[in-house]
Every structure is written in C-alpha cells, then in structure tokens.
Amino acid sequence: MSAAGEVARVMLVSVSRVHGSVMQQLLLERNIASQRGREPGVQAALLHASGWFVMWLEGQDEAAIDRVIQRYRNDARHAHQRELHRSRGPASLVEPLTVAATQGPDTPADFARRIYAIKKEDQRAPVQPASIWEQLSAPSTLPQKAGSQPGIARLIGLVASDDPGSVEIIRKLGERFARPVVYQRFAAGARNSPDVGGAYVDIDSPCGAMRVQLLSRRALANLMVQRSLARLHSLALLLGARPRAAIELAGSVAAFVDAAAIRPAIQLVTQCPDIAGRVGALLSQGQRAGARCAVVQVAESRLAEYLQQVLQGTQACPQAA
C-alpha cells in the first residue's frame, strides 16, 4: 500500500523532431497547459537537451498520467519514446508545465549514453526523479568518475539584469580553463511569463570539481532553478555601479535565500563601498540575519581573472564575516 501523500512519478525520454526554435515550441506548450491544463491533477516538466526531450510527470491519478503519456506517444515531435523511470513517492512539481532547455557540448549520442547509464542505475536501486532531472538538465562536462556527482562546490555570479556583458565573464572563464560553457533557458508555468537564462562552466580545480554558474536576477525566482542550487556553496553578486539596480538584485537574492534551505557565503563584487554597504545591510535584515557578506573590490572586467585565481587556489575566496 502506498503511503498517504505519495504521487505517481513517471519520466519519459524521446528523440526531438522539432524544427525551428525549440524554446518557442516549449513556451507554446507551456501556455496551452497553463490555460486549460493538459490533464487535471497532473503536473509536468519538459526539458530539451542535445536533440532529446525529457518529460517528467506527477499526479495522484495514474490513469490521468497514462492519458498524458498516450498523447505524448502520438505526438510526431517525439520519436522513439521510452519510459525511463516510474515510481511512487513525494511530489516535487507544483505547476501544470514548466519547461527548460540546455545547450552544451553533448551530442545526441552522448545524451543517449547518459540516459542508458541512468536507466542502469535506476534498475540497481531506485533513483529519485529530481536527481534524474538534474543529471540530464545540468550534466557535468567533466570526465565522470564512478559514484561521483556533478559539482562539489559552486560559485554563482548574478547580475542585476540579463546583461550580455555578464555572459562574457563565463565565456572568458571557459576559455581560460579550456572548458565548454553550457547555456540554459527556464520558464515557469504561468502563461506568457518570460523565460530566463543561465550558463555554467565546470572546472576540475585543486579543491575538486567546481561549477561556476551564472544566472540572471529573474532566474532566482524560478522553482526549478532554486532546486538546482541545493548544493550552493557561495554566491557572488555583481553589483555594478547603479545603486537602484544593485538594490533590486539584493531584493531578489534576499527572497531566494529566505525561501531556500541553504545559507551560502555571499560575496559583493563592486568597487563602490556605498553600494556594498547598502546591499549588505539589506541582506542582513529579518530572516537573513545570519547571511553576512564579504566585499570583493574588483572590477567586473577583471572578475574572470579573479575567479580563475580562486579556482586555481592562488586566491582565497573571501568568507562572510
């Protein structure tokens, strides 16, 4: 007998037959689902990566889930559909349909090997759907070691807006370490809500596998993004030179830290002591009383160099006071 509160959880994979913009197709599916619902009581997440789709379904009624699966199997955009995982357990999804897309170095054949490895692992001992989603939506680009998980520690740079200049920081870091950059898009379940972006690079540092992840300010409010940051170690805020934008960024970070079950070390990257003081004061209020901040006085144009030194162990990363 299933425990009270458990839901059916199914994960499917298929080869993408979408032509044109995949993200536009995903957003259209999201809008349809949010307007009338694909199936009452069924929550879903849909990922596109390396020429594959991953569909994650949850709901109390397994018959309703199976009706969604049947429509999925009849959709010409999804070829070679197969079931990757089925179980009952705690629910993780809360919206009719959230969507994500990942663009990285994996070829379709590489991604197929990831799927096969997860299937074998799941046959030996049940794997939680959230873990499967993380492995497929944000895979490590480092050579995998037996039993390892992607990323031991993370540094995350956040900007006040989707500034292309901040993306250049992660590109430079990838170039310095000769590592590929993975780009991500996320969209919540609300109809017509905009998608948000992110990017990351994985580094094999002296301290172990490290992931440097860049997120837009708006991305912090996305539930799937929040769950992906469960092992967050430290958070670098790129405050820039505009006080208002810096305060808006601080507000987004404060809401994220309040909602999360983590307390990362926070670095305030700025050359303006006044902005750092105002942001630090805001982050130390209320429930965030323990979230003290360290100031990193470095120009954003030199941030890639600073992060390189941190990852190589030649520069200590400031710890929160």
Image (spheres, rainbow, N blue to C red):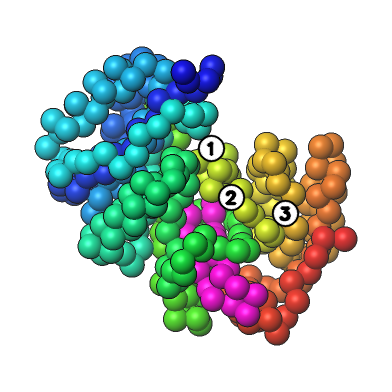
Front-most of residues 8 and 196: 8
Q: Specify few, some or many for label 1: CA neighbours under 10 Å numbering under 14, 14-19, or 20 or more.
A: some
Q: Specify few, some or many for label 2: CA neighbours under 10 Å numbering under 14, 14-19, or 20 or more.
A: some
Residue under circle 2?
Answer: 229
Q: Residue at x 15, y 44 (%)?
A: 80
Q: Residue at x 50, y 32 (%)?
A: 92
What secondary structure is marked by label 2?
loop
Report whether 267 appears left or right of 137: right
Q: Is residue 175 above or below residue 47?
A: below
Q: Is residue 177 above or below residue 53?
A: below
Report whether 41 appears left or right of 267: left
Q: Is residue 189 visible?
A: yes
Question: Where is residue 91 shown, x and y percent of the image?
Answer: 50, 28
Q: Quadrant of the C terminus?
A: bottom right
Tell me which segment is drawn in magenta.
196-217
The label shown at residue 54 is: none
User: Amino acid type of disc 3?
Assistant: Pro
Residue under circle 3?
Answer: 264
Question: Where is residue 5 shown, x and y percent of the image?
Answer: 53, 19
What's the CA distance linking mark 3 and mark 1? Answer: 18 Å
Q: Residue at x 61, y 48 (%)?
A: 230
Check if mark 1's residue and mark 2's residue have beta carbons within 8 Å.
no
What secondary structure is marked by label 3?
loop
